[in-house]
Amino acid sequence: MGKKSFWDSWNIDKSAELYALKDWGAGYYGIDSQGNLTIRVQTPQGLQEIPFTEIISGITERGMNLPVLLRIENFLDSQISKLNLSFKKAMEAQNYTNVYRGVYPIKVNQQEQVLHEITRFGAQYHHGLEAGSKAELIAALGIMEDPEACLICNGYKDEEFIDLALNAIKMGYKVFLVLEMPMELELIIKRSRALGIEPKLGVRFKLSARAGGHWSESGGDRSLFGLSSTQVIQVVDRLKDEGLLHCLELLHFHLGSQVPNIRDIRRAVLEAARLYGGLVKEGAPMGHFDLGGGLAVDYDGSQTNYEHSRNYGLDEYTYDIIEQLISVFDQEGVDHPVVLSESGRATVAYYSVLLVNVLDVTRFEPQPLPEKLPEDTPDTIVSLYDVLQDMSRKNLQECFNDALYFRDQSLQLYQHGQITLRQRSLMENIFLTILHKISNHADSLKRLPPGLEGLNQGLSDIYYANFSVFQSLPDAWAIDQVFPVMPITRLNEAPTRQGIIADITCDCDGQINHFISMKNPQSTLPLHEFSHDQEYYLGFFLVGAYQETLGDLHNLLGDTNVVSIRIQQDQTFDIVREIDGDSIADVLSYVEYEPPVLLERFRQKAERAVKQGKISPRERRDMVQGFETSLRGYTYFEREDN
């Protein structure tokens, strides 16, 4: 009896293992007995589990088409709780004598619903906000209600920005103006004197420590923002001269958005804690220690220091930070400050899932070859056919090299008109048959011969999905960010195909070809056989951070429909909010077209066609109505029956 394969006797547990669901899913997802991916939420009444198929049916029956960005409020609430409770536990375990205050950086996801839910649910923890621009500050001031929550003001600040912050301080809010550049201090002093309002000041320290990953430039001596130790001392001296040193209450630093290695975090906290102690000894009251961002999301589930992962858990992160702070502050005799962090990515990444439907599939498989080649077959194609006949497991490399040679020779003859189109088709079919035969043999080899490493990707299917990478997953295109992706149905069936995912932008960059797996990142994703008779849905996960507002209008594909849900305690869900995606008229107006003008121009063209006898008045009416309906329509693919 032969050795059993992983692919034998398929079940839902193997699907969970194949797509690393338990590694990146943080317990938020499961698979039911019918093979449907589910949302899992723990409530006081127990575990609530809802299949994605039920949610999709609820959405489409209400008239919304896919693609849909699904926001799951329970996940956002859960992430806020986990962060606050983990810091609380770490502080209590180590006798830290102050508290934690979370601060959500608005830039990570600026949507009003996100800020509203964070401030509403986070009020029990006094969870605050961070603003890096005037627009973000205005949004924060319009939404925040809790006077105990902190509002951190980063970024460049002009008079209007500073005045907004100072007025909020006078109204009783904890608003900190963080000095990013030395020149900001003079303007803050000037506006403070003019309004008669003392500022609450912080300084952003430019760490010498740096972290690995995409966002390593946020730290280090060459980071774009922050003050050096010399500049910090200059700020202290200037505040002393103005009698305002008592206004300096906060130290801020930022190591990066996604720091995968806990050692980098420990080193940065240690360095910043020493500076904090130095400021206290200079006479500043301080009282607030802002860690900035850095808490990573384990996108690939590998639990490593790979740039899309992290080699630590949340409890280890909070415990190590508090441990480092205590070691420095107790040694220097400094009171324990309020600890803040701006953990935006870890707060909102789980919140959103992009749901798309597959429209079609291209398969790169050969057609059956004739038993005998036609007598007029060119010699190069005959030689290619001989390579196929002579192939064995032992000569794969030689056959691959020969096949490439005869394929290229045949293409040259075609370009010179010496091979017909039908003969070229025969040649390509033979070559494709050779590649598949090599691939089948290669599966049994321990190591692929040189030049064949990318063969499986070259033969993989292309699944065309109804979305735009540039609009909904811009980081996948711009910085090769890896997001978990998997089917949400048929998970009780073995996925027998290997594919990449293409969007509908007609751009070669509009594809996803890097996927997480049980072992190493892969260039193809196991998928199920596609049929036009059955909807096939894919989910892109952990997309709540940065993706919504970084997206662009490539091919004028706009924002998707957005649906927010809340899982209830009786295995049901409520649709909390629905936001229509951009219409064609919307996206045209974004690029300076005027939809009413376009409609009028089309109407005039149709009228000219009537006068020229090309169409009837009734046809004109239908065409104009169709044009007007299209302007109001969704920018993405819509089924005819919708």
Image: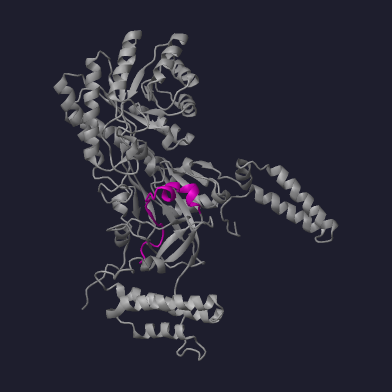
Q: Is residue 392 visible?
A: yes
Residue 638: x %, y % from top left: 58, 56
454, 70: nearer the viewer: 454
* Rendered position, 51 above or below 566: below
* Rendered position, 563 above or below 189: below
Q: Name the outermost residue toward the left.
A: 331
Q: Is residue 95 visible?
A: no
Q: Which quadrant does the C terminus fall into? A: bottom right
Q: Quadrant of residue 97?
A: top left
The colour scheme of the drawn protein is one colour
Q: Name the outermost residue toward the front.
A: 416
Residue drawn at point x = 49 percent, y = 85 percent: 378
In the displayed structure image, the side of residue 620 where residue 169 appears, left or right: left
Residue 362: x %, y % from top left: 48, 67
137, 42: nearer the viewer: 137
Q: Which quadrant does the N terminus fall into? A: bottom left
526, 251: nearer the viewer: 251
Q: How many marks?
A: 0
Residue 89: x %, y % from top left: 22, 32
472, 91: nearer the viewer: 472
In the displayed structure image, the side of residue 275 where residue 527 appears, left or right: right
Residue drawn at point x = 68 percent, y = 44 percent: 595
In the displayed structure image, the side of residue 538 where residue 609 appears, left or right: right
Q: Quadrant of residue 221?
A: top left
* Residues in magenta, as a range: 467-494
- In the rendered image, residue 470 lying in the magenta stretch gets the answer yes
* Rendered position, 151 above or below 601: above
- In the rendered image, residue 305 lying in the magenta stretch gets the answer no
Residue drawn at point x = 44 percent, y = 77 percent: 407
Residue 109: x %, y % from top left: 44, 37
